[in-house]
Amino acid sequence: MILLRHGQSEFNLAFTATKRDPGIPDPKLTPHGEEQALAAALALGDAGIKRIICSPYTRALQTVAPIAERLRVPVTITPTVRERYAFSCDIGTPRTHLQRDWPHLDFGHIDEIWWPAIEEPDAQIEARAQLFRGEMATLPGWQDTLVVSHWGFILAMTGERVMNGQWLRCDPTGPAPTEIVWRQYHPTVVQP
């Protein structure tokens, strides 16, 4: 299957510049993020995708829109592939509002509030990724599946860090990553 990280969001742009949480819940894509989504739609056009699974966050829904339109493939929305809850951007939009804003998609099977109320520990997102990996491994046609997701979920699935708009292939029948580095620390320069 292919794991695609959503395009650049308003949160990503602000956080990259300041390294501080800018307080933007469920952010939209920036114009650059929209370009990344269109580029992914073009690049993945010949990838043989027959199934699309997408996170309910707005940035993921905006990323998947041009892909689903170009490929004419239905989109299944599931919070299982959502981002790890750790910042303001991980506060989602209630299901009824998503259904209003995206009437052609089915949100009826998800809870009104589908994101957690508190920060998600490393082990919890890793367990969620393992559960998804197991479900996908038993699903016929997993090879033809695109999953539009997030940095943390893709890291938990593969052990690899991806940039906005970047994708990679993942074999759910293969081994899970043995080591996931959530935080990268840089040694402090000691002054004499």
Image: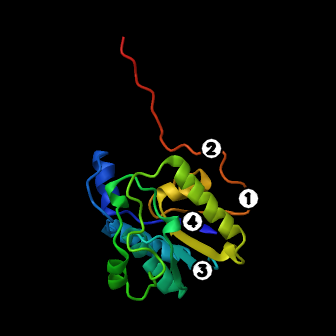
Q: Which residue is mark 2?
A: 179
What's the amino acid at mark 2? Glu
Marks 2,3: beta carbons within 8 A: no
- Above or below, 70 against 47 in this view is below
Residue 21 in the image, given as x and y percentages of width and height: 29, 50
Q: Which residue is mark 3?
A: 51
Name the one closer to the observer, 127 or 9: 127
Residue located 45% across and 60% down the image? 83
What's the amino acid at mark 1? Gly
Q: Secondary structure at mark 1?
A: loop
Q: Which residue is mark 1?
A: 174
Name the one closer to the observer, 147 or 56: 56
Q: Quadrant of residue 133?
A: bottom right
> Disc 2 and disc 3: Cα gap in Å?
29 Å
Q: Secondary structure at mark 3?
A: strand
* On-image quarter of the C terminus: top left
> Disc 3 and disc 1: Cα gap in Å?
20 Å
Q: Earlier in the sequence, mark 4 or mark 2?
A: 4
Residue located 62% across and 62% down the image? 131
Q: Crowding at label 1, few (<14), some or many (≥20) Cα neighbours within 10 Å?
A: few
Q: Which residue is mark 4?
A: 3
- Above or below, 101 against 1 in this view is below
Q: Secondary structure at mark 4?
A: strand
